[in-house]
Amino acid sequence: MPETLIKVKGLKTHIHTPEGVVRAVDGVDFEINKGEIVGIIGESGCGKSMTALSILRLLPPQAKVSGEILYRENDLLKYSPSQMREIRGKGISMIFQDPVTSLNPVFTVGNQICEAITLHQKISQKAAVEKAIEMLGLCGLPSPGEQFKRYPHQLSGGMNQRVMIAMSLVTHPEILIADEPTTALDVTIQAQILDLIQHLQSKLTMSVLLITHDLSIISAITKRVIVMYAGKVVEYARTSQIFAAAKNPAAALLHPYTRGLINSIPNIDFTETTPQTPLSPLSKRLNTIPGVVPNPMDIPTGCRFHPRCPNAVQVCREVEPKIRLCGEDHGIRCIDQGDRLKTED
């Protein structure tokens, strides 16, 4: 059996505001095993990043978190602030979405990496500098000794992202949470960053929780995938299972939301041309999921996806479905036809 590093059970993160309660995360369950890359996917506003911030307890004071976040069988929600500071960076590290705003502009990148080292390890400043430069080199920065002395504004977006990765991994954490690590980068740099994460994950034997909205990234590097919608997990499976089922439109082994996400990927055959009209206008439209993610202060009754689901029936509007198993390591939060008949009876 694989060793489980993190087990999230019934996680709820509700933020209390003057306008009402924002149910950003509303009952999430998943686990991460040692040495694997797990992906979380969903549209913006589905609760992906808030789930990650809840694990590290990097939340505003008005956020109320309940449930369990078991890291090596210890519930992080019961840890004191000082205990969480020990966990952050040493046990669990995080790469944030925008490296430019995550790095302090008034300190050199080397100074910031050294601070992360000395916070968790009792070593000399000289040894910390050597370790920081070594990690910058490992993360693919040219002339790491020179880059060590630079400020964030003197580096490109891709280089700053490599600095963030170096800072996250310099203490050799067991788990790396990568929150949209390639969003602000061009396609070429995206590929380099993903290759780097895979290389370091293998070299350091760590686990990775990769948060993204890009299914191509999920298919390329993750072993398992968790699909989130409106604060809940609507599907989880092995990545290979998800994309194998997607190739069969008649298969009933995908949540309608997951299928909608996959169908929204632009196809290389999207344009139709003929020898007579090689530059004719597009004759096909991109597939989209109608509507938008619901306001977390105004969640629909029943299945949260029913206002956008092409398969929704009346019971979907009334009954909130539970996760049901439909194969090994594959669960779907959807009311199938048998459940509908049983519920309606």
Image: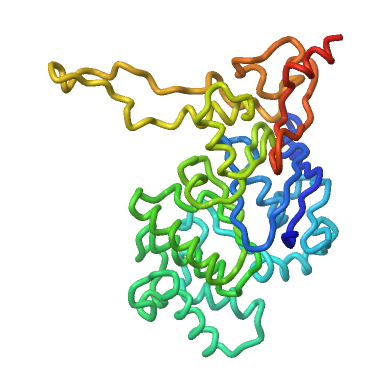
Q: Is residue 328 above or below residue 34?
A: above
Residue 28 falls in which quadrant of the image? top right
Q: Is residue 226 above or below residue 150?
A: above
- Residue 231 in picture, x, y percent from top left: 69, 36
Asked which colour scheme the image uses, the reply is: rainbow
- Residue 118 in picture, x, y percent from top left: 62, 80
Query: How many numbered marks appear?
Result: 0
The quadrant of the image that shows the N terminus is: bottom right
Left or right of 199: which side holds 54?
Answer: right
Question: Residue at (75%, 30%) from the top-left corner?
Answer: 20
Question: Residue at (49%, 40%) from the top-left corner?
Answer: 215
Q: Is residue 52 above or below residue 89?
A: above
Question: Residue at (72%, 60%) from the top-left corner?
Answer: 2
Do we see residue 65 in this rendering? yes
Of residues 21 and 137, the one nearer the viewer is: 137
Q: Is residue 25 above or below residue 150?
A: above
Left or right of 249: which side holds 158?
Answer: left
Do we see residue 108 in this rendering? no
- Residue 326 in picture, x, y percent from top left: 72, 33
- Residue 89 in picture, x, y percent from top left: 64, 68
Of residues 1 and 256, the one nearer the viewer is: 1
The quadrant of the image that shows the C terminus is: top right
Question: Residue at (52%, 27%) from the top-left corner?
Answer: 248
Residue 317 falls in which quadrant of the image? top right
Q: Residue furthest left?
A: 276
